[in-house]
Image (cartoon, rainbow, N blue to C red):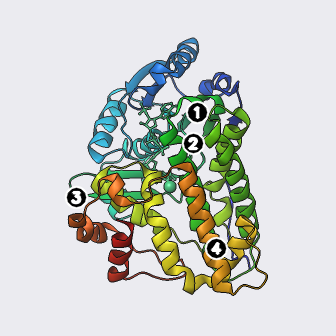
Amino acid sequence: MLGNFSYCNPTKLYFGEDSLQALNTELPKYGKNVVLIYGGGSIKKNGIYQDVMQILQENGKNVAEIAGVMPNPTLNKLYEGVEIARKHQADFLLAVGGGSVCDYAKAVSVSVNCEEDPWEKYYLRFEEPSCETLPVGCVLTMVGTGSEMNAGAVITNTETKMKIGHVFADEKIMPKFAVLNPRYTLTLPHYQMVAGIYDIFNHICEQYFSGEDDNTSDYISEGLMRSLLHASRIANQDPQNYEARSNIMWTATWALNTLVAKGKSTDWMVHMLGQAVGAYTNATHGMTLAAVSLPYYRHILPYGLKKFVRFAEAVWDVNPVGKTDEQVAQEGLDAMEAWMRELGLAMKLSELGATEEMLEGLADSTLIMKGGYKVLDRPEILEIFRESL
Ligand code: NZQ
Ligand code: ZN
């Protein structure tokens, strides 16, 4: 049964090869002082920076820059960006990059006019902003996180080894608009492309593997997963295939723009395990999820057997005739494992730099979620990390 909810997603999307031109429609809505936020330089190599700069100049903007936002953006980098935005008296933040850059822009947005420490307020106490926030726009260059159409912002505190995501309840934290040009994603290294694909898949799983009810969201999720599997196989063989890459981009947005979570419980435990790994190793987000997923899902399978059977049949076309529910469910996960290996995902934490000595710390760093089929205790978390190593 669908629970009670309200739904509003105010992010305007511009999709396709000419979508950058939408900046000419959007930028005039905001003040003159723009802070352009980007990562380690990919946008300078592929020309997106130059194109964006030209449009900013043609629109008469006074531009400051926050460059070098790293994958898994850190708290220290957030402090630095907040200072730049304050000094520039920013009216608008334009993020050009992947999830890290988009997340970071949102974290700057909620911190610029906030006197309290953002880590304490947003990442330890999970409060909503009580100050004026800055509008954010996003030009997406890496597909996976859904950050372009959600209110999530993940920040890593390298000192305490905590990587924490805050999904703000206030929809004004969502980007005002996002430019989605699949062509921009064609320069991504294969490693990042497949990490993003797995991130998308896992976002859907996190919202699918929960609840016993009949729920429209689960049917939407199954459709998204099937589309992703199809497109991912094409893109894996032929990364320059625009049709596949455009479908992957669109699926990523719908996988985590709050839609498929509506009216049902959600899990997010794989992300909590993966984020702990990210805090310790700084590994690529999607790969941290890939490495812990199968031990986790095999562990919780008996508690959510019916859903795993449904997953096997509806997503992986497992034929149930003459098989027990357990066999069908296991075959579904086996098919998922085969697909993950086909893409070349990291299947072990040791591939990401995690070691036996880190296990206790990883368990300490893992937040425990309560919405899935089994609420894990610390020994179970340790066991899953050990199996993933
Ligand atoms: O920094 P540059 O030089 O731009 O290089 C980036 C970076 O090294 C590169 N890249 C991006 N676009 C490119 C490109 N290289 C060539 N061509 C392009 N077109 O890709 C690398 C990874 O970028 P990043 O932004 O870090 O990847 P992703 O989009 O996966 O974002 C990861 C961050 O998002 C958080 C993760 O935890 C992680 O911190 N997440 C945010 C979520 C949200 N807002 O809801 C949910 C997710 O579960 C996730 O936790
Ligand atoms: Zn993710």
Instruction: Tell us which disc is closer to us: 4 or 1.
Output: 4
Amino acid type of the residue that numbered disc 4 sits on in the rendered structure: Glu
Q: Is residue 361 left or right of residue 93?
A: left
Q: Mark 3 = which residue?
A: 160
- The relative height of residue 130 versus residue 59 in the rendered view (above or below) is below
Task: Say which residue appears at 60% left-offset and 65% top-offset.
Answer: 205
User: Few, some or many C-alpha atoms within 10 Å of disc 2 (few <14, some 14-19, many ≥20)?
Assistant: many
Amino acid type of the residue that numbered disc 3 sits on in the rendered structure: Thr
Q: Mark 2 = which residue?
A: 143
Q: How far across and down, in percent of the image, does residue 71 sit? A: 39, 42
- The relative height of residue 289 versus residue 43 in the rendered view (above or below) is below
Mark 2 or 4, nearer chain start: 2
Q: Mark 4 = which residue?
A: 331
Mark 1 or 2, nearer chain start: 2
Q: Mark 1 = which residue?
A: 185
Check if mark 4's residue and mark 3's residue have beta carbons within 8 Å: no
Mark 2 or 3, nearer chain start: 2
Q: Secondary structure at mark 3?
A: loop
Check if mark 1's residue and mark 2's residue have beta carbons within 8 Å: yes
